[in-house]
Image: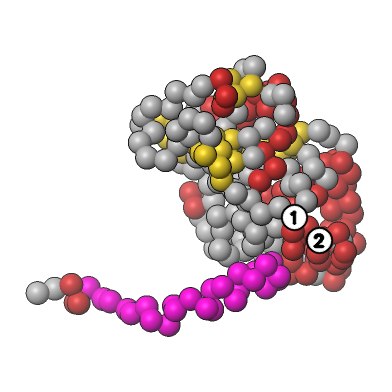
Amino acid sequence: MPGHSVGENTVESVKKDVEDLTQLIQAHDIIFLLTDSRESRWLPTLLGLFYKKIIINVALGFDTYLIMRYGRKNGDAVAKVEASSTRFQKISGTELGCYFCNDVTAPGNSLKDRTLDQQCTVTRPGVSSIAGALAVELAVSLIQHEQGIDAPAFYKTGPQHDLSFDDEHGGILGVVPHSIRGFLSSFTHVLPATPRYNQCIACSDIILKEYESKGFEFLLETFNSSTNLENLTGLSALFHESNYVDVMEINDEDWEG
């Protein structure tokens, strides 16, 4: 996992684990990512995208959950959003983003110096069952769509109270969203969709080509330092180009009077 250093005496065992995981992903059609930390999803995401598998990601919070399908990359086309014939926006299935596309930093060791409730371990009792069921239904709807893994996703900007989809937006089982965000505190869902990010630390061409050319060597570099991903994708430069030096510190006394 990115940010989880590999000692010299464990390199061979880690390499064997990576080979086993790679073989598992190659041997299956659908990959469900149900791990409990951000960084633990990175390698399965990379491998699943590299081998063009259907990937369904599930992430849990205390009373929230996210179910997301990944797009299958098709060449070096730039992801774009199109307006459909209705009031919804459309993203091609080959241009859908992954779990890491909204990140501006690489995942690190999120398990270090954190209590259980800070590790997405404590949830309301029904969250995992609800999210797991929706993940299966999303996978079923996807494989029954005439375009399969390449099924497009639609989303609506503005108020979400009216999400009545037309036949254009789905397959034989109905709509196939890019992602489902659930909130148990209000018992509601929203169906956002986002395009691929060309500097994504998991699904960008830069990362996939680096893995193709260097293989385990690239993975080992990333395990030992997650900033390797930021440097490769240009996120480090993007961060430094921003004017963070202009941020001012304000303490409580500044708000008084």
- Which residue sits at x=52%, y=58%? 114
- Residue at the spot x=19%, y=77% of the render? 253
Residue that carries the numbered disc 1 in the rendered image: 76
235 up-or-down from 18: above or below? below
Give the crowd class for mark 2: few <14, some 14-19, many >=20 residues within 10 Å: few
The disc at residue 209 is: 2
Residue 83 as seen in the image, left or right of residue 77: left
* Magenta span contains residue 235: yes
Q: Position of residue 212 (x, y in %)?
A: 86, 59
- The region drawn magenta spans 228-252
- Type of amino acid under label 2: Lys
Task: Reply above or below: 116 against 137.
Answer: below
Q: Which residue is painted at 20% across and 77% down in the image?
A: 254
> Residue at point 74% right, 47% down?
73
Q: Amino acid at mark 1?
A: Asp
User: Marks 1/2: CA distance?
Assistant: 11 Å
Give the secondary structure at mark 1. Answer: loop
Name the side, left or right, on which 51 lies relative to 104: right
Can you tell which quarter of the image residue 218 is in? bottom right
